[in-house]
Image (cartoon, rainbow, N blue to C red):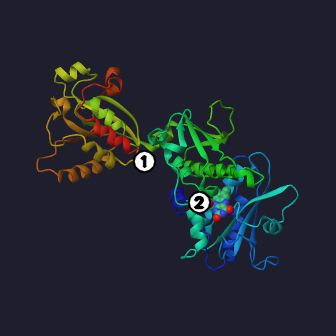
C-alpha cells in the first residue's frame, strides 16, 4: 500500500452499495490479505468473508437498514484477551485502507448489526467475541437516506482540532505542529481516523521521540457492549500512525511502558510508540537555507515561527574574515551579513513557501538597509548549500521582481562561509522581549497563527 495520506483522506464510511458483486479474483485477493495481517500486540484475529447470498442468510443478514445492497461482509472474531481490541482496530484498519486503495467501500460496524446472525455465519466458537463487521462492495453514487442520517448523527465529516488531541510532555501543554517535526503527518493521520460514533478518543503526548497514546473513555459509552469499543478506536489510531511513519522510513515500535504522566479524568494510558532517532534519517528529511534580512534578532524570531522550521540559529555569512565577532561585523568592515540559518522539513514546507514568508517581512528593494539598520551587514541575501536550490530561489526572486519596479536587492549566492553568532544573540527577542526589532509583532502573530 502506497501513498497512505491519500488513502486515509479518501476513506469514508460507505453505507450504500451498488448491486455489483465482488469478483472471485478480488475475493481471493482479500482472503490472501487476511493471512498477511499482524499487529503490534501479537494477538490472533480471525477473519471470515461472508456472502449475503449464503445458504443460511437468504440475502438478509441484518444491519437494521443501515447498510444497503452490500453483497459481502468481513467479520472479525477473537478471544477477548489483553490488547485484543486494539489489535483488532489496528489490523482491520490496515485491511480497510487496503480495500480503499482498491476502490472497495467499507464501514466499521460495531453496533448496528445483528450479532447473533453474523456470529453464526462466522462460526463463532466458545469464548470468542464478534465486535466488528464491515460490509464490502462498490460504493453507490447516490447514498440512501439512512446513510445521510447516520453521517449527520455521528457528524462523520468533522474531526476534533489538533490542539484538543496532541500534547507535549504532559496534558497541560499543547503540541504545535512544528514541535511534532517529522511526526506531524503521522499525527495528522491519527486525527483523521474513523472511530465509533466519531468520538475520536485518542489523546497523544509527545515526550522527546516517544509518543504516549491515551484513551479518553466517553463515560457510559461502552455500556451497551461487553467490552470497551473505544479500545478498537485506539488500535485504528495506532495503525494510521504506524503506516504513515513507515512510509517516511522512520523506525520505531509500539510498547507498553510504565509511565508516570498524570492524565485527566476518564483518560487512560494504553501504549507508546518509541521512535528510533537516526541522524541519517533526519538529515534525509531536513534541509538547510541561510537567510539574511536585516538585524538577525527579529528575522530569527519570525522565521523560527514558520510551520515546518525545525531549528534556527543566527550567525555571520559570506564575509572576508574568519571567526568574526559581533563587534567585527558591526564596526570593522568584514563583509559579513547577519544571517539566520534555518533547518526545515521540506515535506511540511517547501523552500519556495519559506521564501515567500521571508519576503513578507523585508523590504526586498532596499540596499544595505532594513528598518533603522544601515550597513552592508544588513544587506538581504539568500545563501544556499544545495546547488539544486538555486533554480527554486531564482524563480522565486523572478516572481517577486514582477511586483516591483525597482530592482530586487536580495543577493542569491552559494554559502561561502558562516560563523555562529555569540550565545547572547541566539533567540535574542525571546530572551529580551522588549528588544529592538524591525519586524512588527503583527508579523510574528500572523506566522504563529499559520501553525
Ligand atoms: C469501532 C467502530 C464502530 C462503528 N460502528 C458503527 C455502527 O455500528 N454503525 C455505523 O453506521 N457506523 C459505525 N461506525 C462508523 C463511524 O460512525 C464513522 O467511522 C465516523 O462517524 C466517521 O465517519 P467516516 O468513517 O465516514 O470518516 C463505527 C466506527 C468504528 C471505528
Image position, residue 58 (x, y; %): 78, 80
- Relative depth, front residue between 124 and 203: 203
Helix, strand or loop for disc 2: loop
Image position, residue 432 (x, y; %): 32, 23
For label 1, the crowd category at 10 Å Cα-Cα, with few meaning under 14, some 14 to 19 and many 20 or more, is some
Instruction: Decide if ligand 1 comes within 8 Å of the CB at mark 1.
Output: no
Locate residue 381: give its quadrant.
Answer: top left
The extreme left residue here reads: 406
The numbered mark, 1 or 2, whose residue comes first in the sequence reads 2
Image position, residue 301 (x, y; %): 33, 33
Which image quarter holds the C terminus?
top left
- Residue 203 visible here: yes
Residue in view at x 31 percent, y 49 percent: 352
The numbered mark at residue 348 is 1
- Relative depth, front residue between 359 and 37: 359
The numbered mark at residue 154 is 2
Instruction: Decide if ligand 1 comes within 8 Å of the CB at mark 2.
Output: yes
Amino acid at each position: 500500500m502506497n501513498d497512505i495520506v491519500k488513502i486515509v483522506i479518501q476513506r469514508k464510511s460507505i453505507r450504500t452499495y451498488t448491486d455489483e458483486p465482488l469478483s472471485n479474483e478480488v475475493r481471493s485477493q482479500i482472503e490472501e490479505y487476511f493471512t498477511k495481517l499482524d499487529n503490534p500486540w501479537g494477538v490472533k484475529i480471525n477473519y471470515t468473508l461472508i456472502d449475503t447470498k449464503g445458504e443460511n442468510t437468504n440475502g438478509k443478514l441484518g444491519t437494521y437498514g443501515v447498510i444497503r445492497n452490500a453483497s459481502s461482509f468481513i467479520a472479525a472474531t477473537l478471544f477477548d484477551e489483553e490488547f485484543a481490541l486494539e489489535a483488532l482496530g489496528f489490523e482491520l484498519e490496515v485491511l480497510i485502507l487496503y480495500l480503499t486503495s482498491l476502490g472497495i467501500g467499507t464501514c466499521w460496524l460495531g453496533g448496528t448489526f445483528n450479532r447473533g446472525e453474523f456470529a453464526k455465519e462466522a462460526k463463532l466458537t466458545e469464548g470468542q467475541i464478534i465486535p466488528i463487521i464491515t460490509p464490502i462492495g462498490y460504493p453507490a453514487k447516490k447514498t440512501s437516506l439512512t446513510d445521510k442520517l447516520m453521517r449527520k448523527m455521528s457528524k462523520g465529516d468533522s474531526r476534533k482540532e489538533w490542539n484538543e488531541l496532541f500534547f507535549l510532555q504532559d496534558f497541560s501543554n499543547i503540541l504545535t505542529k512544528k514541535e511534532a517535526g517529522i511526526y506531524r503527518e503521522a499525527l495528522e493521520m491519527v486525527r483523521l481516523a474513523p472511530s465509533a460514533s466519531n468520538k475520536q478518543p485518542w489523546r497523544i503526548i509527545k515526550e522527546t521521540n516517544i509518543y504516549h497514546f491515551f484513551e479518553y473513555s466517553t463515560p457510559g459509552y461502552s455500556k451497551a457492549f461487553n467490552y470497551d469499543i473505544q479500545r478498537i478506536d485506539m488500535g485504528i489510531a495506532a495503525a494510521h500512525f504506524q503506516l504513515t511513519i513507515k512510509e517516511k522510513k522512520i523506525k520505531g515500535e509500539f510498547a507498553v511502558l510504565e509511565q508516570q504522566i498524570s492524565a485527566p479524568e476518564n483518560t487512560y494510558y494504553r501504549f507508546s510508540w518509541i521512535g528510533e532517532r537516526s541522524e541519517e534519517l533526519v538529515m534525509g528529511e531536513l534541509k538547510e537555507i541561510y537567510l539574511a534580512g536585516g538585524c538577525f534578532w527579529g528575522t530569527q524570531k519570525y522565521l523560527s515561527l514558520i510551520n515546518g522550521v525545525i531549528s534556527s540559529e543566527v550567525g555571520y555569512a559570506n564575509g572576508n574574515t574568519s571567526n568574526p565577532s559581533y563587534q567585527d561585523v558591526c564596526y570593522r568592515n568584514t563583509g559579513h551579513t547577519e544571517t539566520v540559518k534555518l533547518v526545515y522539513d521540506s515535506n511540511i514546507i517547501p523552500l519556495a513557501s519559506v521564501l515567500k514568508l521571508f519576503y513578507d517581512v523585508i523590504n526586498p528593494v532596499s540596499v544595505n538597509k532594513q528598518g533603522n539598520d544601515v550597513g552592508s551587514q544588513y544587506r538581504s541575501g539568500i545563501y544556499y548549500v544545495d546547488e539544486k536550490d538555486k533554480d527554486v530561489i531564482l524563480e522565486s526572486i523572478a516572481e517577486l521582481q514582477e511586483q516591483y519596479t525597482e530592482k530586487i536587492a536580495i543577493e542569491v549566492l552559494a554559502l561561502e562561509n558562516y560563523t555562529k553568532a555569540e550565545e547572547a544573540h541566539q533567540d535574542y527577542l525571546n530572551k529580551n522581549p522588549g528588544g529592538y526589532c524591525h519586524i512588527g509583532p503583527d508579523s510574528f502573530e500572523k506566522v504563529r497563527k499559520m501553525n
